[in-house]
Amino acid sequence: MGLLYITLCIVFLMMCKPPLYMGPENIKYFNDKTIDEELEWDKRVTWIVKFFASWPNDCQSFALIYADLSLKYNCTWLNFGKVDVRCYANVSTWYKVSTSPLTKQLPMLILFQGGKEVMWQPQTDKKGRAVSWTFSEENVIREFNLNELYQQAKKLSKAGDNIPKEQPVAPSPTSVSDGESKKEK
Ligand SMILES: *[C@@H]1O[C@H](CO)[C@@H](O)[C@H](O)[C@H]1NC(C)=O
Ligand SMILES: *[C@@H]1O[C@H](CO)[C@@H](O)[C@H](O)[C@H]1NC(C)=O
């Protein structure tokens, strides 16, 4: 009885929470197929990818912070992506991000360099439980070395390197991006 009630509540919460954030952001919305193509496309591009779902409270509060970071730091060689784990369970499982409604792993932030995962938060302890981590703007900037990554990316741009012209032609479901609000840092 109790368990059924809890399950119903969780299902209700999962279905009824409003969209996390609808404002400007420079974030690419990945699905099961596009993430591989994008990571393989040009391995010099550093990717920060957020795995999220609509129900954890931390995802709600982090949506705005992540959008803000993407506006400040996205550039040719440093890109931001996100994956909705509820829609794209395969890719989430692939990167060992739990899709369970009770998971403490969301949001999960993974840094990819050279097409490989090099760093992520939250980390897991020996028993496989997510170690709690505060997803504040300062923490992300410090832990993922965003300022340094951004400087490196700018150097690549100055060196005149260009991304190969043709971008992978995969549909991105609902990438909300507002070019005008993009600021250079
Ligand atoms: C990130 O910045 C690059 C270079 O300015 C731009 O081409 C790209 O569209 C941006 N990405 C997103 C998802 O807005
Ligand atoms: C699952 O995701 C991985 C990583 O993106 C991908 O390589 C694999 O082809 C996917 N499998 C299916 C059945 O889509």
Image (cartoon, rainbow, N blue to C red):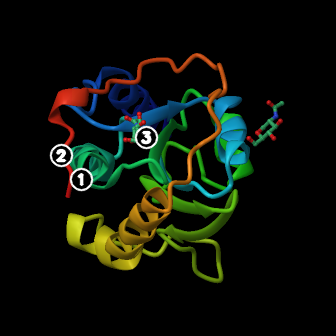
Disc 2 marks which residue? 183
Q: Rate crowding at label 2 as few (under 14), some (14 to 19) or many (20 or more) other CA atoms within 10 Å.
A: few
Task: Tell us which disc is closer to us: 2 or 3.
Answer: 2
In screen coordinates, is 38 left or right of 13?
A: right
Q: Quadrant of residue 22?
A: top left
The answer to whether the residue labelled 1 contacts the one labelled 2, judged by CB atoms less than 8 Å apart, is yes
Amino acid on which disc 3 is placed? Gly
Q: Nearer the viewer, residue 12 or 157?
A: 157
- The residue wearing badge 1 is 72
Residue corresponding to mark 3: 2
Q: Is residue 180 left or right of residue 126?
A: left
**Which SS class for mark 3?**
helix
User: What residue lies at 64% left-to-right and 72% top-to-bottom?
Assistant: 128
Q: CA distance from mark 1 to mark 2?
A: 6 Å
Q: Local crowd at mark 1 within 10 Å, few (<14), some, or many (≥20)?
A: some
Instruction: Say which amino acid is labelled 1.
Output: Lys
Circle number at residue 25: none
Question: Percent x, y for residue 2?
Answer: 43, 40
Along the polypeptide, which appears first: circle 1 or circle 3?
A: 3
Question: Which residue is at 31% across, 55% downward?
Answer: 73
**Disc 3 residue: CB within 8 Å of ligand 2:** no
